[in-house]
Image (cartoon, rainbow, N blue to C red):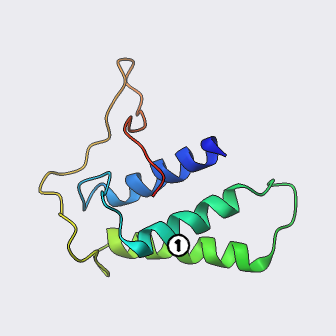
């Protein structure tokens, strides 16, 4: 479960990092809901068919995050980044995930 939570946390931060200072704390209720839908889908084995509603909720969550990233929507009251996003790099030149994480 922790691996799925970490993956979702990193995915959300990567999508929003170009526009907002991440991690977003405190996270708005809608962002928590989106994270929950993403985690729920991640708990299903990829070889098992899961309910269509799970996939639909996941796809809606990703679309919502991308709409925020693309400035079609916003997170009111959340500080926007003034710096261009550049993923942190490891010493061997590969992108690393953010170290400070939490469940939304």
Residue 76, horizontal then vertical, whole percent: 23, 77
| Residue 34, placed above or below residue 11 | below
x 43%, y 69%: residue: 31
Q: Is residue 37 left or right of residue 34?
A: right
x 38%, y 38%: residue: 98
Q: Is residue 86 left or right of residue 99?
A: left
| Residue 102, placed above or below residue 42 | above
x 62%, y 59%: residue: 39
Number of marks in the image? 1
Q: Residue furthest right?
A: 48
Decide: few, some or many residues near mark 1? Use Cα within 10 Å; few <14, some 14-19, many ≥20. many
Residue 6, horizontal then vertical, whole percent: 53, 44
Image quadrant for the C terminus?
A: bottom left
Name the residue that disc number 1 marks. Answer: 61
Nearer to me, 23 or 92: 23
Q: In the figure, residue 19 lies in which quadrant?
A: bottom left
Nearer to me, 49 or 37: 37
Q: Residue furthest top?
A: 91
Nearer to me, 7 or 47: 7
Q: Is residue 26 left or right of residue 104?
A: left
Q: In the figure, residue 78 lies in which quadrant?
A: bottom left
Q: Residue furthest left?
A: 82
Secondary element under disc 1, as helix, strand or loop, is helix
Residue 12, horizontal then vertical, whole percent: 44, 57
x 48%, y 52%: residue: 103
Q: Is residue 35 left or right of residue 69?
A: right
Residue 8, horizontal then vertical, whole percent: 53, 53
| Residue 9, placed above or below residue 29 | above
Nearer to me, 24 or 52: 24
């Amino acid at each position: 479960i922790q691996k799925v939570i970490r993956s979702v946390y990193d995915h959300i931060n990567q999508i929003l990092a170009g526009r907002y200072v991440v991690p977003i704390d405190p996270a708005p209720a809608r962002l928590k809901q989106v994270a929950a839908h993403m985690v729920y889908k991640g708990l299903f084995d990829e070889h098992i068919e899961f309910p269509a509603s799970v996939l639909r909720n996941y796809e809606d969550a990703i679309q919502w995050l991308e709409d925020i990233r693309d400035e079609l929507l916003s997170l009111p009251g959340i500080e926007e980044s003034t710096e261009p996003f550049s993923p942190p790099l490891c010493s061997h030149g590969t992108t690393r995930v953010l170290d400070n994480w939490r469940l939304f």
